[in-house]
């Protein structure tokens, strides 16, 4: 389903998220645009893109890392936020996603919320990811690819 996004972990434990679909190297503008992070109108904004240089800025890397984390860990694509769910016809909200995966950590919820706010800088999840692994286990939901957090 997401064959162009990869997570690499080095022998010393460093994690790298790579989205080859919209790869940008130093001062060379990307040759393509990934729809993995949302519609162009959601990504080609001053928060994520420098219109003077034609280059994406650091904020896009943080957004990409969090989006990849949610896809790989929970099976949830955050690009669906504020779009209509094709099965229910209802607008997908962050609260609905948090409820679906049982994410009850305010710190993580707030960092994800920031991704959708144009005037607030993003934050990496950082230590929050480790806290989740210490306090929760993942359980696959019946008849779905989505995984839900369950307290240990």
Image (tube, rainbow, N blue to C red):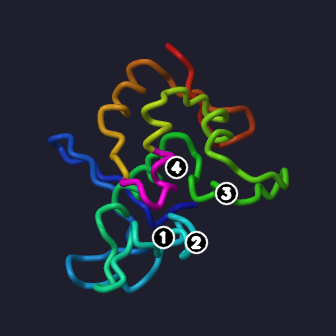
Q: Quadrant of the N terminus?
A: bottom right
Q: What residue does disc 3 label?
A: 82
Q: Helix, strand, or loop for circle 4? A: helix
Q: Is residue 123 above or below residue 105?
A: below
Marks 4/3: CA distance? Answer: 17 Å
Q: Are marks 2 and 4 in contact (CB under 8 Å)?
A: no
The image quarter in which residue 38 lies: bottom right
The numbered mark, 2 or 4, whose residue comes first in the sequence reads 2
Indicate the position of residue 14 as horizontal and vertical percent values. Answer: 21, 45
The image quarter in which residue 52 lies: bottom left
Q: What residue does disc 2 label?
A: 39
Whether residue 63 appears in magenta in the rendering, the answer is: no
Q: Helix, strand, or loop for circle 2? A: loop
Q: What residue does disc 1 label?
A: 43
Q: What residue does disc 4 label?
A: 71
Q: Are marks 3 and 1 in contact (CB under 8 Å)?
A: no
Relative to the observer, which residue lies in front, 75 or 124?
Answer: 124
Q: Which residues are magenta?
A: 112-121
The numbered mark, 4 or 3, whose residue comes first in the sequence reads 4
């Amino acid at each position: 389903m997401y064959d162009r996004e990869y997570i690499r972990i080095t022998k010393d434990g460093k994690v790298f998220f790579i989205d080859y679909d919209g790869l940008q190297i130093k001062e060379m503008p990307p040759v393509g645009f990934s729809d993995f992070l949302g519609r162009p109108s959601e990504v080609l904004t001053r928060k994520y893109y420098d219109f003077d240089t034609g280059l994406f800025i650091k904020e896009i890397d943080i957004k990409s890392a969090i989006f990849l984390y949610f896809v790989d860990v929970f099976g949830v694509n955050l690009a669906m936020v504020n779009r209509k769910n094709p099965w229910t016809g209802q607008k997908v909200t962050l609260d609905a996603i948090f409820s679906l995966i049982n994410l009850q950590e305010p710190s993580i919820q707030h960092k994800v919320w920031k991704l959708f706010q144009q005037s607030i800088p993003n934050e990496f999840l950082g230590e929050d990811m480790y806290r989740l692994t210490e306090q929760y286990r993942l359980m696959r939901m019946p008849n779905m690819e989505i995984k839900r957090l369950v307290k240990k």
